[in-house]
Amino acid sequence: MLSSIFNTLLYQPFYNALVFLTAILPGGDVGFAVIALTIVVRFILMPLTHKQLHTQRKMKLVEGEMSVIKKKYENDKQEQTKQMMELYKKHGINPFSGFLLIFIQIPVLLALYFVFTRGIPFTPDKLYSFINLPPDINFLFLGLINLSTKNYILAILVGVSQYVQIKLSLPPMAPRESGATASFGEELGRSMSTNMRYVMPVMIAVISASFPSVVALYWLTSNIFAIIHELIVRRKAKEIIKS
């Protein structure tokens, strides 16, 4: 039943939208249709991602105050939690909102991924009655990249863009203090941050290289959109935290 709902509400609409965009864009270029569909979906999700990015950015801007609270009440976890929640309330931060937003976005992103991995080449059996297969379908993006085969250069660009996007979204790692013994939690945090910054982009590049390049093009477009969005939010978040 869940599979049927997923197909009806997400997969089929995205698949038909991709076919429609391919039909109306010049030359029937599937690559431009993939970029257009990715941007449209990202704009639809923007209210969710925008709120999530604002929350992340505002939390980074109050990290100094958070550190003071943690140090001051390190032996009183109950009071530490109380002070943290008061700090969040003061700056209008909901630290739990990001989890809900992520869960909402996952089905949409999965549907797009399945469209690009399973829906190409196009077949008429998945189309709505008012959508026709384009007379010309061009899988050679910009006359250079065959979207039905792997492309390692595009995969490398995905990895680089993912690194930039993660670098912008994560706070800088605090340097280790000379002679200080880090706690387990601090070491775990540093390890996770390092993996996110350096290991994940490599993994995503490898994954992109193992699929047809249409997936890499979608991922690259999504990353570039996220980078631009993050830069805009970064500029505006300082004004919001002061208001």
Image (cartoon, rainbow, N blue to C red):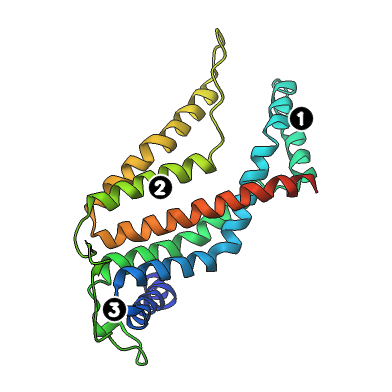
Q: Earlier in the sequence, mark 1 or mark 3?
A: 3
Rendered view: 23 above or below 235: below
Nearest the viewer among 121 and 26 is: 26
Residue at the image position 38 percent from the left and 41 percent from the top: 200
Residue at the top extreme? Answer: 179
Image side of residue 60 versus residue 33, left or right: right
Query: Which residue, given by chain and number where applicable, does mark 3 sit on?
Result: 27
Q: Which of marks 2 and 3 is nearer the N terminus?
A: 3
Disc 1 versus disc 3: distance between alpha carbons? Answer: 64 Å
Disc 1 versus disc 2: distance between alpha carbons? Answer: 41 Å
Q: Earlier in the sequence, mark 1 or mark 2?
A: 1
Residue at the bottom extreme? Answer: 130
Image side of residue 170 versus residue 134, left or right: right
Residue at the image position 33 percent from the left and 59 percent from the top: 217
**Tag 2, which secondary structure?**
helix
Residue at the image position 33 percent from the left and 48 percent from the top: 157
Q: What residue type is labelled 1?
A: Glu
Of badges 1 and 2, the one in the foreground is 2
**Residue 42 location (% of width, % of height):** 49, 64
Q: What residue type is labelled 3?
A: Gly
**Tag 3, which secondary structure?**
helix
Neighbourhood count class around disc 3 (C-alpha, 10 Å): few under 14, some 14–19, many 20 upward: some
Image side of residue 107 versus residue 89, left or right: left
**Residue 129 location (% of width, % of height):** 34, 92
**Tag 1, which secondary structure?**
helix
Residue at the image position 31 percent from the left and 68 percent from the top: 31
Query: Which residue, given by chain and number where applicable, does mark 1 sit on?
Result: 79
Nearest the viewer among 132 and 186 is: 132
Q: What residue type is labelled 2?
A: Ser
Neighbourhood count class around disc 1 (C-alpha, 10 Å): few under 14, some 14–19, many 20 upward: some
Q: Say which mark, if any, is on residue 161.
A: 2
**Residue 182 location (% of width, % of height):** 54, 17
